[in-house]
């Protein structure tokens, strides 16, 4: 039976009300998920972020008992998709496939960034770790790293290198590579890895340093050249390609990660549920094989481990960016 309270009784009842807002949060955690889960990918289809997200969609959908859909939102160096994720309801039904270049790089390059990687995003689970490969256009007159270095030095400022956007890890990698070999190159930014790869394959830009997952098919078809892996170890997806150290340029490595994040404020039980399911999927042999064939590796992490890694990256990559004076302003 419902009764209307009056006077002082009503006021005392209202004073006791602050405990009530906790109920929807608890109820949301208990009822999760009750509809489709969306993974926002802040890049076009075909890139490393998209590849990492799609590795988990089917398994995660089966585990949660709800559809899991990909929403590609490219543009503004990842900020369009990231902003959409940050503004989503913190109920676990919207996730972000975050790229380390955006997560750690954007805060160092953009003064007026509208999101903060620590304040506005909650770590959920690691998806893939990805080395970078130095790719060359089919018309590039160099097939090995030493030939590329010699050609770049003999033609300062004439080689173009692609990136998936100003300030992306590919941009940073190209600048660091240019300094490492002592030869200036021209940066050509694109809106994502896929269009950049198209122009490399078409011979319109000579070099692209990116994750192997989006390039293996083109390498295998002979449409682009894989010159060296910018990593400490070879890629299982491109086992014949030497590392930069093996090819004569030790010290030049560039690894990236792709991880699930959620809007800040998602209840801890939901984060733990998602982390547990994604870690379990990361141990699935079929998914691991697909990841390796795509030139990446799976790295199951707890929420705390991912949080610590992401915070370290913000510091270390930020220092590199500031040292090279790379900005997006």
Image: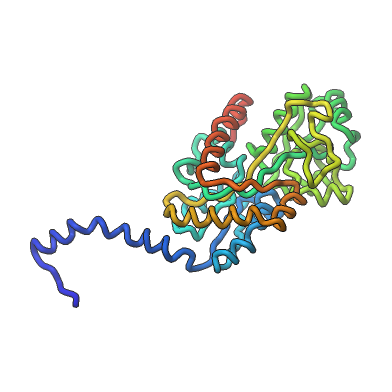
Total tally of numbered discs in the picture: 0
State left or right for residue 231 relative to residue 318: right
Q: Between 269 and 263, which is closer to the camera in this rendering? A: 269
Q: Position of residue 45 (x, y in %)?
A: 69, 55
Q: Position of residue 206 (x, y in %)?
A: 82, 38
Quadrant of the snapshot with the N terminus = bottom left
Residue 75 vertical position relative to residue 181 in the rendered view, above or below: below
State left or right for residue 131 relative to residue 301: right
Quadrant of the snapshot with the C terminus = top right
> Which of the 4 image quadrants contains residue 132?
top right
Going 69% across and 53% down the picture, which residue do you hit? 51
> Which of the 4 image quadrants contains residue 232?
top right
Going 78% across and 37% down the picture, which residue do you hit? 229
Q: Position of residue 142 (x, y in %)?
A: 89, 34
Whether residue 239 is visible, yes or no, is yes
Whether residue 162 is visible, yes or no, is no
State left or right for residue 199 relative to residue 257: right
Residue 201 vertical position relative to residue 158 in the rendered view, above or below: below
Going 50% across and 68% down the picture, which residue do you hit? 35
Going 78% across and 24% down the picture, which residue do you hit? 181
> Which of the 4 image quadrants contains residue 245?
top right
Q: Position of residue 79 (x, y in %)?
A: 56, 46
Residue 153 vertical position relative to residue 169 in the rendered view, above or below: above
Residue 162 vertical position relative to residue 51 in the rendered view, above or below: above
Q: Between 178 and 100, which is closer to the camera in this rendering? A: 100
């Amino acid at each position: 039976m419902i009764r209307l309270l009056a006077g002082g009784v009503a006021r005392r009842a209202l004073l006791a009300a602050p405990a009530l807002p906790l109920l929807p949060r608890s109820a949301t955690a208990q009822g999760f998920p009750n509809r489709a889960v969306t993974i926002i990918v802040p890049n076009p289809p075909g890139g490393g972020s998209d590849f990492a997200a799609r590795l988990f969609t089917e398994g995660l959908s089966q585990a949660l008992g709800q559809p899991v859909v990909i929403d590609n939102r490219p543009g503004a160096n990842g900020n369009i998709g990231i902003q959409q994720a940050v503004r989503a309801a913190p109920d676990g039904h919207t996730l972000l496939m975050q790229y380390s270049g955006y997560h750690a790089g954007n805060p160092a390059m953009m003064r007026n960034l509208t999101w903060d990687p620590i304040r506005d995003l909650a770590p959920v689970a690691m998806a893939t770790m990805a080395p970078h490969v130095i790719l060359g256009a089919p018309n590039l007159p160099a097939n090995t790293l030493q030939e590329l270095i010699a050609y770049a030095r003999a033609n300062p400022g004439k080689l173009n290198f692609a990136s998936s956007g100003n300030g992306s890890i590919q941009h940073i990698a190209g600048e660091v590579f240019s300094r490492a070999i002592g030869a200036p190159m021209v940066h050509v930014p694109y809106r994502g890895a896929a269009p950049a790869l198209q122009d490399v394959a078409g011979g319109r830009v000579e070099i692209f340093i990116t994750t192997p997952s989006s390039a293996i098919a083109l390498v295998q078809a002979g449409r682009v050249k894989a010159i060296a892996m910018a990593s400490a170890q070879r890629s299982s997806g491109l086992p014949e390609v030497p590392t930069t150290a093996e090819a004569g340029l030790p010290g030049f490595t560039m690894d990236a990660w792709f991880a699930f994040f959620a809007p800040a404020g998602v209840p801890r039980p939901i984060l733990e549920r998602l982390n547990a399911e994604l870690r379990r999927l990361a141990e699935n042999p079929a998914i691991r094989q697909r990841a390796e064939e795509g030139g990446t590796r799976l790295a199951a992490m707890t929420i705390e481990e991912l949080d610590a890694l992401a915070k370290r990256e913000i510091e270390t990559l930020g220092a590199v960016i500031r040292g090279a004076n790379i900005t997006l302003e």
